[in-house]
Amino acid sequence: MSDANVVKLLQPGSFTDPLTEVLRNGARALLAQAVEAEVAEFLAKHVDLKTATGLSRVVRHGHLPAREVMTGIGPVGVRQPRVRDRGAAAGDGERICFTPAILPPYARRSRSLEVLIPILYLKGISTGDFEETLAALLGKDAPGLSASTIARLKEVWRDEHEHWRKRDLSAKRYVYVWADGIYLQARLEDAKQCILVIIGATPEGRKELLGFTDGARESAQDWRELLLDLQSRGLVVAPELAVADGALGFWKALGELWPTTREQRCWVHKTANVLNKLPKSQQPKAKRSLQEIWMAETSKDAEAAFDAFIAAYQLKYDKAAQCLAKDRQALLAFYDFPAEHWKHLRTSTRSRAPLPPCGTARSARRAACRIKRRSRWCSSSSMRLRKAGAGSMATTSCPSSFKVSGSPTGSRSPPTRRPLKPKPPPPEPSGHHQDSAIAPSAAPRR
């Protein structure tokens, strides 16, 4: 290999970056202004306090020694102002103390950098490589990130995780749960190990991480231990619905510990399983047919699309049809729950997306708004027809009530699309107008 084929990579510290220096100098000036403004605001709150001799009680008292704070653009030097309470003795419980919020005491790294360090560790950066890695990101002057510092941080992380893992769940209730196994490549002794994760949704619509642990290929024993741990910490009320893929280990453990919880199979995983049993030439068409099932407006339409798929592929591709048909009930279970939750319940890949509240009060208000919009749509359509000169018309009836989405229902809410302005009908030769009727436009697919 000749020298012309070798490209020498630049090393951190071997060059200067004017843009980074400008940003760092600007950050240093802004940080100094921010800490001075914070002290000035604190002094203004206590300006009325006086000592026995009539002097101001809370005053400035110089600065602390200069220190460098590691940030995302490298180290930034700063001096924290000091505040003195002249009206209280040392150690007095009523002594006024200044606690800075922008620059906490003994802070050596910004919050964003504190979050970056554990992420790099989980991505596989070794303890001894942190100093070199962060030097490439933050500059050659990135101090305080040696192997011993990372080891101390690991102990803190373990303590925080242990406290979180033993938290009490007796006051918690979760309506839905999502379960999945996440396979990681970093820091696992066995390549077949994975992380078992369970996420729950409260009746208020907030999603929370319930628990996670390492397992061996998502076995039933590992899932059973995780569910038992949740029960031992007070989670005694079983969720209404559990969403997961086709891993049999979770479903077996769920049936043993939460037998009343309904099962919802993930449509994303099931679609991939069905398509794998079809030739590539048939996969695009089959994928569209599967989408017509879980994107149907009502459970009745979904059942019809399900039967159509089985009938179309049963004879020639029986394995694909059987793969879908065997989980029919578990695939369509989400239709028995509020329509606004369907996009979250039919797959486990949306487990981190925000969920609308599960309470009936909010759902009732939404249903009332839909009824109001529907009535307004009907009245506006009638007025347009009258203006068009229609002699008679077929009035579109508005439903008197809709099912509240807080209770299980098998149909979507009525459409709210604005109707198109109808054209006036052509006059008949006899001089009379034809009867006209405007049908509501098709409901948009969600």
Image (tube, grey):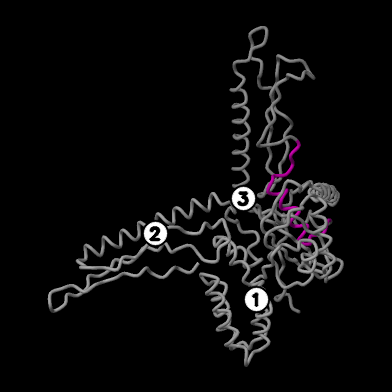
Query: What's the residue at 63%, 15% (across, down)?
Result: 49
Query: What's the residue at 61%, 50% (across, down)?
Result: 204
The segment highlighted magenta reads 106-127
Q: Residue furthest left?
A: 430
For the residues carrying marks 3 and 1, which lies nearer the camera in this image? 1
Q: Earlier in the sequence, mark 3 or mark 2?
A: 3
For the residue carrying disc 3, how many other residues have a C-alpha within 10 Å: few (<14), some (14-19), or many (20+)?
some
Instruction: Determine whether the residue tagged by mark 3 lies in a helix, strand or loop.
Output: loop
Magenta span includes 82: no
What amino acid does circle 2 point to?
Answer: Arg
Q: Quadrant of the N terminus?
A: bottom right
Give the label on residue 17, or none.
none
Query: What's the residue at 82%, 69% (across, down)?
Result: 219
CA distance for labels 1 and 2:
34 Å
* Residue 188 relative to residue 78: left or right: right
Q: Earlier in the sequence, mark 1 or mark 2?
A: 1
CA distance for labels 3 and 1:
30 Å
* Residue 154 relative to residue 406: left or right: right
Q: Residue furthest front?
A: 400
Residue where numbered disc 2 is placed: 374
Instruction: Determine whether the residue tagged by mark 2 lies in a helix, strand or loop.
Output: helix
What amino acid does circle 1 point to?
Answer: Arg
* Label 1 with label 2: CB-CB less than 8 Å: no
CA distance for labels 3 and 2:
27 Å
Whole-percent x, y for residue 84 in the image:
70, 21
Quarter where residue 111 is shown: top right
What amino acid does circle 3 point to?
Answer: Glu
Instruction: Determine whether the residue tagged by mark 1 lies in a helix, strand or loop.
Output: helix
Residue where numbered disc 1 is placed: 328
Quarter where residue 231 is shown: bottom right
- Residue nearest the observer in this picture, 208 or 239: 239
